[in-house]
Structure formats: C-alpha cells, structure tokens
Image (cartoon, grey):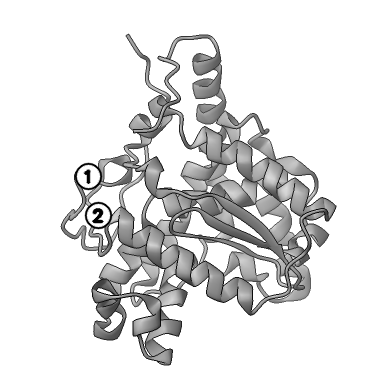
C-alpha cells in the first residue's frame, strides 16, 4: 500500500480548461489541451535545440560550470523517473521520448531553458547569481518541469497560430523563417501567451513540480526559497526584472507558494526514503 506524496497541484484560475488531447488528464489531474504527440515534441525539441546551439557560444565539456550543470541535471532527470512521484503529480511522461542533454551557453543572460524532449541549456550569467548546487537544482528543476508537464505543447495549442501549428505537418526546416522563430519561441518556457494569467499559471506549476523534483533528487528545497527571494531583491535594486523572472508569478505570491510546498516536498521525500511509498523507478 502506498502513501500519498503530499503534493496537490493548483488549477489555473480565470482560464479556459481546454480539452485534453493526450492519453489522460494533465498535471494535477487538470484538463490540458496539447498540440503535439511525445514523438513530435522530441523531434521539434531536437531541431530547435540544435538550431539554438549552432548559433550560440558553448562552454567546453571540461568547464567546471558544464560539469556542474550535467551533474545536477542528471540527478534531476533521474528523479523524473520515480514512478510514485510521477503518479502523484499525474505527469504522463514517456521516458523513451526524453533524450536529456545539458549544456552551458556563454552569455551574460540570467536564464535557462528546457525544450521538449529534455534539451536543457543554462546561460553562464546565471552562475554570477546562484549560490551552490542546491540553487542550481532550483533552476534546472523548474525548467525540466516545463518539459515534463508538456507546457510547450500546451502553449502551441493555446497560441492559435496557424503558421506555428503547421509544424505538425513537418519539421522546422519546412517552415518559413518567421514561423520557425515563432515555433522555437513557443517551445521555450517563458513565452508570453495572449493569456498572461495562463502564462503565470504555467510558471507556478513549474515551481511546484520543480521543488518536488529537486527534493527527490537529494537537494535542499529551502534553496528555492533563498534563490527566488534573492532574485526579487536584485530586481528591486536594479529597478528591472532579471530575465529569469519575466512573466513569473508576483514575488509575494511565489514566496508564499514555496513556503507552503517545501514542507510537503520534504515530507514526501522522507516517506519515500522510509519505504512508505513503493520505490518504483522504472519508466512508464
């Protein structure tokens, strides 16, 4: 007999729930409209990732920052295979359609992203802000959560852009330049939808899932509270938002949510470690 992992995801407020076109309900058992199959997500994620990396300055594999990102990312990816956790969140993840890659792009941008299919990149400017691997896990867990929750597929479905949706009939290479740029933008977390409320809801959902992922990966979830608090302080000092805060929940709301979720993540991990939850780690 399993015990619950004490995770309850919110339902987006003020947004049309949509029709679930996947094989079941979305994260937290909310309805979720999706435009892409897992196979299409992986194919488009691969193409978009290669296009982005080919136009970026990558740090070499032996750079300490790359090694850190790959170590932390690997632990987060393994946590994303824990079946009781996936069941609790109601994440329908096809691990055969996830090809995890972790790279660091040389840039002063304070940001990171995870494209569908598990394609992750961290901008080197983030290392000027984070304090230790627990905070790095906060960022990577948040970005990975977007991919696990099929947020890009949902953004494409909600965008209503005929040119973007034409990607369903081919690859990025088959699209005109403007449509290709639009699609790559939609594949990346943080894209602004017409419904800003829904955009912020996806960010809150990624915060929520990310806190549980980092905790089950063995990182301290209190670091999430420290990181996002410091981001808001940096924003106040500079008078402008760091890029990583764009279209995210308001500072007070985010902090309050994290304060509520962190004890639940810790309790769920403790129950799992004590064998009170069936320790399945195989792919769905």
Answer few, some or many: residues within 10 Å of disc 2's Cα (few below 14, many 20 plus, some between 14 and 19): many
| Residue at screen point 73% across, 68% down | 58
Q: Is residue 36 left or right of residue 129?
A: left
Which residue corresponds to the image point at 43% horizontal and 68% vertical from the top-left?
Answer: 187
248 and 278: which is toward the camera: 278
**Going by the image, does 119 lie left or right of 133?**
left
Position of 98 relative to 189 (above/below): above
Instruction: Please tell me the numbered disc located at residue 25.
Output: 1
Nearer to me, 106 or 264: 106
280 to 123, vertically: above or below: above
Tell me which label, 2 or 1, sits earlier in the chain: 1
216 vs 175, nearest the viewer: 175
The disc at residue 279 is none
Q: Which residue is mark 2?
A: 32
Residue 218 in the image: x percent, y percent?
A: 64, 29
Residue 215 percent across, percent down from the top left = 59, 32
Left/right of residue 115 with respect to residue 165 in the rendered view: right
- The answer to whether residue 275 is above or below residue 199 is above
Element class at badge 1 = loop
Q: Are marks 2 and 1 in contact (CB under 8 Å)?
A: yes
Q: Residue at x 15, y 57 (%)?
A: 19
Q: Quadrant of the N terminus?
A: top left
| Residue 225 appears in the rendering | no
Disc 2 is placed on an element classified as loop
């Amino acid at each position: 007999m399993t015990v619950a992992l004490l995770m309850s995801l919110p339902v987006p407020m003020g947004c049309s729930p949509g029709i679930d076109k996947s094989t079941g309900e979305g994260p937290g058992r909310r309805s979720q409209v999706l435009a892409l199959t897992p196979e299409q997500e992986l194919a488009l994620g691969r193409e978009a990732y290669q296009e982005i990396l080919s136009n970026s300055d990558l740090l070499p594999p032996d750079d300490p920052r790359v090694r850190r990102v790959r170590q932390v990312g690997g632990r987060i990816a393994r946590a994303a295979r824990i079946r009781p956790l996936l069941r609790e969140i109601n994440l329908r993840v096809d691990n055969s359609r996830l090809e995890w890659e972790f790279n660091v792009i040389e840039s002063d941008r304070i940001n990171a992203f995870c494209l569908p299919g598990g394609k992750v990149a961290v901008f080197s400017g983030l290392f000027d802000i984070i304090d230790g691997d627990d905070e790095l896990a906060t960022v990577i867990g948040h970005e990975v959560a977007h991919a696990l929750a099929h947020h890009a597929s949902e953004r494409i479905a909600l965008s209503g852009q005929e040119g973007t949706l034409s990607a369903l009939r081919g690859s990025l290479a088959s699209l005109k330049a403007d449509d290709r740029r639009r699609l790559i933008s939609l594949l990346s977390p943080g894209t602004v939808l017409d419904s800003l409320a829904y955009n912020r809801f996806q960010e809150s959902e990624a915060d929520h899932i990310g806190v549980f992922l980092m905790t089950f990966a063995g990182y301290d979830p209190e670091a999430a509270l420290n990181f996002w608090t410091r981001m808001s302080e940096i924003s106040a000092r500079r008078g402008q938002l760091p890029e990583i805060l764009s279209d995210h929940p308001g500072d007070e709301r985010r902090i309050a949510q994290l304060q509520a979720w962190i004890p639940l993540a810790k309790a769920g991990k403790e129950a799992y470690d004590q064998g009170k939850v069936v320790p399945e780690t195989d792919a769905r």
